[in-house]
Image (spheres, grey):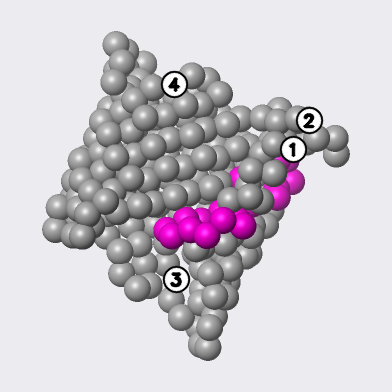
Amino acid sequence: MKMNYITCTLLAFLLSVMAMPAHGQSLELMAGHKRIFADAQWLNFMDAGNRYSIFSRTRATVDYDNNTDLFTGAYLNYTSRIGIGASIVGKIASGGAGADAGIHIFKAKPTWMLFGLASVGLKSELEYSWFSIFRYTPPLGGQWKLYSSLELFSLFRKGGHLASVQRIRLGLDHRGFQFGAAVNLAETGREWAGASNIGGFLRRAF
């Protein structure tokens, strides 16, 4: 497979992130039968009560013909004691830039985590979306855990459905290194035309 400049830059960036000392970060690489998917995440709490936080995410998809799709988003969140709060989102993607405002729910326990965000695009044409991540990581014995994750995203306009994504991970966790099977599904348009990318993933949680 030939890699263009963007692909090489992406891989170099991801390797440099993995080498950096960090708190609340993760890096995932997925190799599928149609494309490579990379995802770098960073979370920082800004107060002692963990009410205010910044979450940033950069992800990229590169197919085996060197077509690249990039996304970077920054989420400014306020979360109440009951786990419900407000979010402002700024994002830059291959298709353009924008901002959203919405309401989220965040719950975290030793063996599971749930984040869900319902938001509206801050633009003249109404857009509304749902984004959520659920992870379940029960212990298996010793320093091993089960690692499972389900990520959902859907985007709509007045005319109907624009795009949806489901990312499914199932594998093992050993001292912050996760690996296993991965499936990325996507649907576009009013007809929900589907596509899939099936393979394996390697993830490092800091």
In what quadrant of the picture does the N terminus appear? Answer: top right
Q: Is residue 172 above or below residue 12?
A: below
| Residue lying at 70% horizontally and 50% vertically, measured from the top left | 31
Between the residue at mark 4 and the residue at mark 3, the CA separation in whole angstroms equals 34 Å
Q: Is residue 98 magenta?
A: no
Q: Which numbered disc flags the more N-terminal residue, 4 or 3?
A: 4
Residue furthest to the front:
21
Q: Amino acid at mark 2?
A: Asn
Residue furthest to the right:
1
Q: Amino acid at mark 1?
A: Cys
Classify residue 62 by image quadrant. Answer: top right
Q: Between residues 176 and 191, which one lies in front from this camera angle?
A: 176
Between the residue at mark 1 and the residue at mark 3, the CA separation in whole angstroms equals 33 Å
Between the residue at mark 1 and the residue at mark 2, the CA separation in whole angstroms equals 6 Å
Between the residue at mark 2 and the residue at mark 4, the CA separation in whole angstroms equals 24 Å
- Position of residue 2 in the picture relative to residue 28 (left or right): right
Between the residue at mark 1 and the residue at mark 4, the CA separation in whole angstroms equals 24 Å
Label 4 residue SS: strand
Q: Amino acid at mark 4?
A: Ala
Residue 4 bears which disc, if any?
A: 2
| Residue lying at 31% horizontally and 28% vertically, measured from the top left | 100
Residue 97 bears which disc, if any?
A: 4
Q: Is residue 67 visible?
A: yes
- Position of residue 188 in the picture relative to residue 53 (left or right): right
